[in-house]
Image: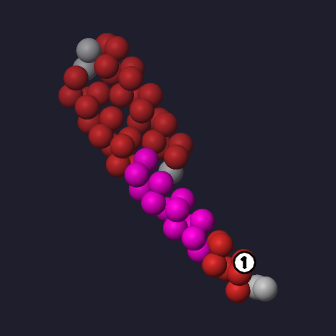
């Protein structure tokens, strides 16, 4: 998922350089959404991994 975030960010930067405002804004908003989804999933996996390791003790 982080890969898709980076891809959409690069698309937004390239589109902004060439002056395609609508495409750049759309790709940037998709990149933001994917980044926050990735961040939430990362935090959840950290919490679940920490609780699983404590239950093994």
In the image, residue 2 sits, relative to residue 28, either above or below, namely below
Q: Which residues are magenta?
A: 35-48
Residue at horizontal 42 percent and vertical 56 percent from the top: 37
Q: Quadrant of residue 19?
A: top left
- Secondary structure of residue under mark 1: helix
Quarter of the C terminus within the rendering: bottom right
> x, y (%) of residue 42?
54, 59
| 20 lies left or right of 1 | left
* Pointer 1 residue: 53
Q: Nearer the viewer, residue 53 or 13?
A: 53
* Residue 17 among those drawn in magenta: no
Residue at horizontal 45 percent and vertical 60 percent from the top: 40
Q: Quadrant of residue 49?
A: bottom right
| 6 lies left or right of 22 | right
Q: Nearer the viewer, residue 8 or 54?
A: 54
Q: Nearer the viewer, residue 54 or 7?
A: 54
In the image, residue 16 sits, relative to residue 31, either above or below, namely above
> x, y (%) of residue 39?
47, 54
Residue at horizontal 36 percent and vertical 43 percent from the top: 32
| 37 lies left or right of 49 | left
Seen from this angle, which residue lies furthest top?
Answer: 18
């Amino acid at each position: 998922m982080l890969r898709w975030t980076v891809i959409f960010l690069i698309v937004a930067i390239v589109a902004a350089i060439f002056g395609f405002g609508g495409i750049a804004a759309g790709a940037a908003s998709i990149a933001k959404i994917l980044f926050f989804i990735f961040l939430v999933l990362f935090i959840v996996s950290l919490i679940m991994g920490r609780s699983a390791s404590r239950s093994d003790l």
